[in-house]
Image (cartoon, helix red, strand yellow):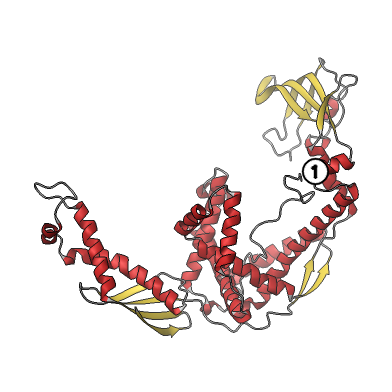
């Protein structure tokens, strides 16, 4: 196969491809064989017509389109691989000719990621919040694990009190009429005061099994339920009281929830895990700031439209998949947020632009820094995912290849490597996290700034064209708060 590449612009290439006559002949032969299987003539069943007769009814002119549909895409992919070029748009194919017994020639125009000499990417100065875990945080983590291993014990020698679990039958009425869905039998109530309106639990404290009480309760106007602002009459009958009995924090407890022997070892491990998690979260913030600092070097005229469209589709697909997992649809979400489809498409395109800029930065830095991803790394990841999914590696790889996600996985690993380099080489000034009040004020200022930008900049782009969204050190989100490094350990 002969390939000639011409640079039209920093974003566009033209590629002439000449496919040898033998390959063309093989494609014609296969196309004829496939067509012959569908041919039916008087006296012959479908697929049983002899080849010599089939040639009368299946001329080369009928096969030309099938040959083009097979040979051209395959030749285009092989030509890109041969020339080590990555296309980021669908090719515009033109000037092809394909006659049996002759070479096939076609020309393809397509977009590529521009080559940019990214500068000043190391040593970027950033200020980043980083939380420092305390012994109180360790206490809370252990307490959550204790609660997860609590056992329920019957209480018979006293009345209800805070944090008990009460099993009750109850009814509720408003103006003498039953409240819709306001009745239940043997209903478990965990009496955590923060979960109820002020004063509600005081009406049932002290009750003993077998006792009944009636009372009125007024729900505040700001209560997040249909009962907000309503006065409701309740009738309760207490059937059973249980209390949580938590395990003691001793060596037996430690061995049950971790691979450690002593409480001190467990506490040290929890502190290490929390510290590592805090650093990962800080690294993500550092990465976002560094990418934003160098993003102006990728001006809007250097962003291929095909790459923007690809990332816009990817973003939309992720949102749709997430909604589907919640048994919701995109139309439902748009109605809830007061958006129309045009507004959503514009939002997807804006996100696509940010992700496209990020990919351009990542791939140019990978070239500059000589960072690569080899097949062994991809195979290792697929092996791990297959084990987690209880599938064979070969089966999972076939699924990923059919879905076209192998290259996306390769880019994800490359991005992680480049991002880690930027984080490791940034000059970071760590500060304590902001208070809730400071964060609320900052959010309000950001909203006002965004509102002002919308009125002065099309699609929120600033004058420099810097817009890098969602840069992360790792794709996989951190777990809540693992208590210990043990298979099956509880959080």
Q: Residue 4: x and y, percent?
A: 37, 83
Image location (x, y in percent) of residue 296? 62, 78
Along the line of sight, the residue nearer the viewer: 414 or 166: 414
Q: Is residue 161 above or below residue 30?
A: above
Q: Is residue 43 placed above or below 307 in the rendered structure? A: above
- Residue 465 appearing in the image: no
Q: Position of residue 437 (x, y in %)?
A: 81, 57
Place residue 360 in its image quadrant.
bottom right
Q: Position of residue 457 (x, y in %)?
A: 58, 72
The foreground one among 458 and 22 is: 22
Quarter of image, res 17? bottom left
- Residue at 33% x, 73% y is 93
**At x 14% / y 58%, what residue is drawn?**
54
Residue located beneath label 1 in the image: 257
Mark 1 element type: helix
On screen, residue 442 versus residue 254, left or right, reads left
Instruction: Decide if residue 489 is in sight here.
Output: yes
**Residue 420 vs residue 335, the one in the foreground:** 420
């Amino acid at each position: 196969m002969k390939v000639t590449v011409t640079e039209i612009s920093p974003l566009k290439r033209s590629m002439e491809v000449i496919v040898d006559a033998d390959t063309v002949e093989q494609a014609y032969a296969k196309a004829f064989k496939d067509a012959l299987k569908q041919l039916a003539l008087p006296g012959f069943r479908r697929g049983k017509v002899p080849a010599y007769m089939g040639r009368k009814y299946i001329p080369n002119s009928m096969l030309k389109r099938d040959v083009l549909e097979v040979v051209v895409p395959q030749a285009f992919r092989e030509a890109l691989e041969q020339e080590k070029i990555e296309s980021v748009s669908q090719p515009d194919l033109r000037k092809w000719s394909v006659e049996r017994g002759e070479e096939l020639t076609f020309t393809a125009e397509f977009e590529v990621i521009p080559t940019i000499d990214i500068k000043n990417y190391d040593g970027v100065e950033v200020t980043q919040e980083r939380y420092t875990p305390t012994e109180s945080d360790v206490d809370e983590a252990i307490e959550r694990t204790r609660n997860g291993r609590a056992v329920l014990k019957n209480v018979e020698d006293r009345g209800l009190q805070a944090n008990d679990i009460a099993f009750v039958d109850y009814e509720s009425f408003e103006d003498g009429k039953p409240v819709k869905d306001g009745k239940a039998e043997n209903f478990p109530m965990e009496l955590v005061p923060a979960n109820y309106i002020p004063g509600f639990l005081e009406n049932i404290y002290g009750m003993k099994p077998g006792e009944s009480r009636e009372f009125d309760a007024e729900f505040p106007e700001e209560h997040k339920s249909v009962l907000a602002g309503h006065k409701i009459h309740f009738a309760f009958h207490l059937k059973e009281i249980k209390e949580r009995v938590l395990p003691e924090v001793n060596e037996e407890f430690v061995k049950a929830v971790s691979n450690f022997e002593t409480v001190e070892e467990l506490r040290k491990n929890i502190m290490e895990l929390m510290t590592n998690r805090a650093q990962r979260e800080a690294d993500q913030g550092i990465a976002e700031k560094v990418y934003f600092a160098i993003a102006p070097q990728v001006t809007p005229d250097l962003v291929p439209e095909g790459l923007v469209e690809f990332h816009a589709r990817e973003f939309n697909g992720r949102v749709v998949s997430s909604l589907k997992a919640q048994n919701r649809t995109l139309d439902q979400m748009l109605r809830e947020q007061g958006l129309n489809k045009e507004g959503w498409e514009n939002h997807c395109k804006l996100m696509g632009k940010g992700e496209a800029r990020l990919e351009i930065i990542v791939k140019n830095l990978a070239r500059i820094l000589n960072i690569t991803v080899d097949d062994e790394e991809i195979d290792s990841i697929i092996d791990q995912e297959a084990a987690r999914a209880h599938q064979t590696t070969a089966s999972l790889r076939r699924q990923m290849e059919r879905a076209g996600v192998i290259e996306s996985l390769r880019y994800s690993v490359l991005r992680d490597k480049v991002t880690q380099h930027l984080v490791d080489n940034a000059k970071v000034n760590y500060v304590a996290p902001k208070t809730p009040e400071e964060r609320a004020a900052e959010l309000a200022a950001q909203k006002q700034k965004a509102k002002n930008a919308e009125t002065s900049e099309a699609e929120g782009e600033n004058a420099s064209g810097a817009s890098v969204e969602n840069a992360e050190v790792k794709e996989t989100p951190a777990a809540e708060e693992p208590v210990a490094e043990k298979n099956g350990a509880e959080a």
